Image: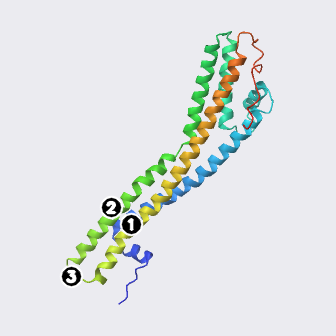
Amino acid sequence: MNQDLSIIALVLHASAVVQIVLALLLLVSVASWSVIFSKLIGLKRVREDNDEFDREFWAGRTLQELFQDAQRGDGPPSPQERIFAAGMREFMKLRERRITDVPSLLDGARRAMRASFQREMDVIEARLDFLGSVGSVSPYIGLFGTVWGIMHAFTGLSNMQQVTLATVAPGIAEALVATAIGLFAAIPAVLAYNRLARDIDRIAIQMESFMEEFSNILARSAAPASPPSAVDAGRTQPQQGR
């Protein structure tokens, strides 16, 4: 008598515990793919928005104009634009208080930008840890289902007087399906985690570089010889190839 050893048949004939494990792994796999696609789309949008603001920043517009645009909120601002607005806002507040000490001005602006940077990174890195957990835990969940399925298969075989390969194969195959599904959930999650982590690191480096460049501009504009209204006096064009 031929036995149906297709994946669907094996799942349907598996024990209740193995079926629960398989259902859990399938749900985790669907959730991880949802996170993967949403993060890929989100990071692409972040890069495009940052690049657009970067072009506007170095296009010759004054800092006051850029700050006013950020304050108006015409369209969703990029993370880099929010970092710029936070630093510029703190810098102008300190100047309104007649603080002329250059280190104090720069320290306040840098602290504001650093706090904004951390908030942006928290948003950008959201749900990335979920992919890491799926990649590390899913194989063990599948292995648990496999071990349980093998135990269940051998328990059933203990009541048989004659054991052949035909009687052993279905139970072992049912158990191994759990390991296969666990790897199916884990491998894409690990690959996506590494890819997304690398992309996020590049975005973080870009924003940190912008903060340093903007801090240098503020340092030149905050020089004692510069009047308070000449915020754009120390601004320079970007280096060739930026």
Identify the residue under disc 3. 160
Secondary structure under badge 1?
A: helix
Q: Left or right: 56 with respect to 13?
A: right
Q: Residue at x 74, y 27 (%)?
A: 67
Mark drawn on residue 144: 2
Quadrant of the rendering where the N terminus is positioned: bottom left
Disc 2, SS: helix
What residue would you read off at disc 1?
A: 178
Q: Residues within 10 Å of mark 3 (few under 14, many from 20)?
A: few
Q: Please report contact status of discs 1 and 2: CB closer than 8 Å, yes or no.
A: yes
Q: Is residue 134 shown above or below 168?
A: above
Residue at 49 percent across and 55 percent down: it is 189
Quarter of the rendering occupied by the C terminus: top right
In the rendered structure, which amino acid carries the disc numbered 3? Met
| Side of 32 where 69 appears, left or right | right
| Mark 1 nearby-residue class (10 Å; few <14, some 14–19, many ≥20) | many
Alpha carbon separation for disc pair 3 and 2: 25 Å
Q: Please provide percent x and percent y for residue 107.
A: 60, 19
- What is the distance, in whole Å, between disc 1 and disc 3 at their CAs? 25 Å
Residue 117 on image: x %, y %: 59, 32
> Residue 104 at x, y = what percent?
61, 14
Label 1 vs 3, first from the N-terminus: 3
Q: Of the residues under marks 1 and 2, which one precedes in the sequence?
A: 2
